[in-house]
Amino acid sequence: MKRLLVLLLGLILLTACSTATTGAQPAPAGDPGGGQDCGYAFVHASTIGSSLFEKWAEDGVQKAKSELGVAIDSVESATPTAIADNLRAFAQRGCKKMIATISFSASEALTQVAKEFPNQQFAILDAEVNLPNVRSYAWAVEQATYVAGVAAARLSKSKTIGAVFGMEVPPLKRWQAGYELGAKAADPATKVLVNYVGSFSDPAKALTLAIAQKQQGADVILPASGSNLGVISESVKNGFSVAAVDPEEAQKGGRAGVAFTMWMKVADSVRLLFGEDWTGAPKGGTRNLTLKDGVFEFDPLTTSSGAYDAKVPADVVKEAKAAYDGIVAGTIVVKNPLTGQ
């Protein structure tokens, strides 16, 4: 679904898998592709049509091919079990450079296959796999939600803001931590309400939780549940503003209740991954993609479409932008709550 912290997380943006597939599939598992080598490969965690997240990931593959001049074989995964099958098939073909995948939902399959092919270089975006031949790329979403927390706290008249997340998984804990820290930095008296839906596909429950937060005083709510349209479209009726995690979803839900948007630039992140140096022996470890990498955007805090300028006072924009600039410069440090670093 989303571009922010659509986070979701990547994770929060993935929806139920479709059985339809498009594009060329790699050779089936057990068949190394007739001996044909490949340089780079990308395995989607679902089908491209199943979510905006996967569409943006494919946009990133195409951007890397165009801007970097590299050949990349890309494949969709029609079912969760197909992720491992596709990764294994590419490894059997011998993708000499690197095989990449995306999303927390692909981490288990990648862990399994990477152990089977210890000399093959793998990479994953939006998750962390601790193996010597897997290079992990994780969005430092706590930095982005810190900025959102600053803006939300300054916009709140009740000194109470909220957030509705999908499942209580590690990437979303990073979202929560940054949002709370930013709000408290802007105004220590701000109360932050947080609820988890327990699913990424339950818009009714997401809306119910948002309304409950409003009843507890929240007048600005960040919905990052994977099913946010109901929260956005019903926000005006229920008397709260939304910090949306995807500009396209904000438009579909009706912008009337949206105060500002923030999102992860998924395509740019995928392109960045393929632009890394993949020569030599397989590499492990994790690289956090930060505000400094330019992979997050905020409207109207760091850019402006003109849709929300009148909703965010100039002093709020200035303070949120100062937080953004401070994080980039290193004068404001927002630690990863999962590692403490």
Image (cartoon, rainbow, N blue to C red):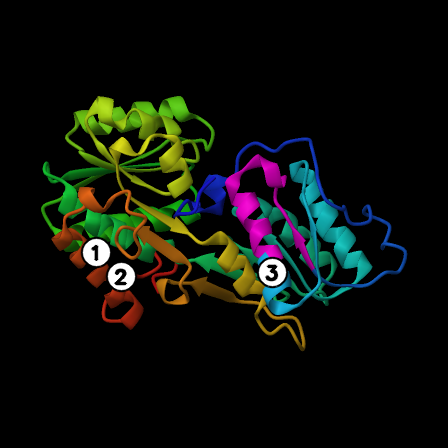
Callout 1 touching callout 3 (CB < 8 Å): no
Residue contact at pointers 2 and 3, CB within 8 angstroms: no
Mark 3 closeness class: few <14, some 14–19, many ≥20 residues within 10 Å: many
With 324 as the anchor, is 266 left or right in this view?
A: right
Give the labeled residue for mark 2: 324
Q: Is residue 156 left or right of residue 263?
A: left
Q: Amino acid at mark 3?
A: Ala
Q: Which residues fall within the magenta stretch?
A: 41-62
Label 3 residue SS = strand
Q: Secondary structure at mark 2?
A: helix
- Which residue is drawn at the image coordinates 61% and 41% (left, top)? 48
Outermost residue, right side: 34
How many C-alpha atoms fall within 10 Å of the one at disc 2: few (<14), some, or many (≥20)? many
Query: Which residue does the numbered mark 1 point to in the structure image?
Result: 320
Task: Please name the residue that numbered disc 3 is placed on.
Answer: 123
Q: Earlier in the sequence, mark 1 or mark 3?
A: 3
- Asked if the residues shown at circle 2 and circle 1 are in contact, with their CB atoms under 8 angstroms apart, the answer is yes
Q: Position of residue 113 (x, y in %)?
A: 70, 53
- From mark 2 to mark 3, how far is it between C-alphas? 28 Å
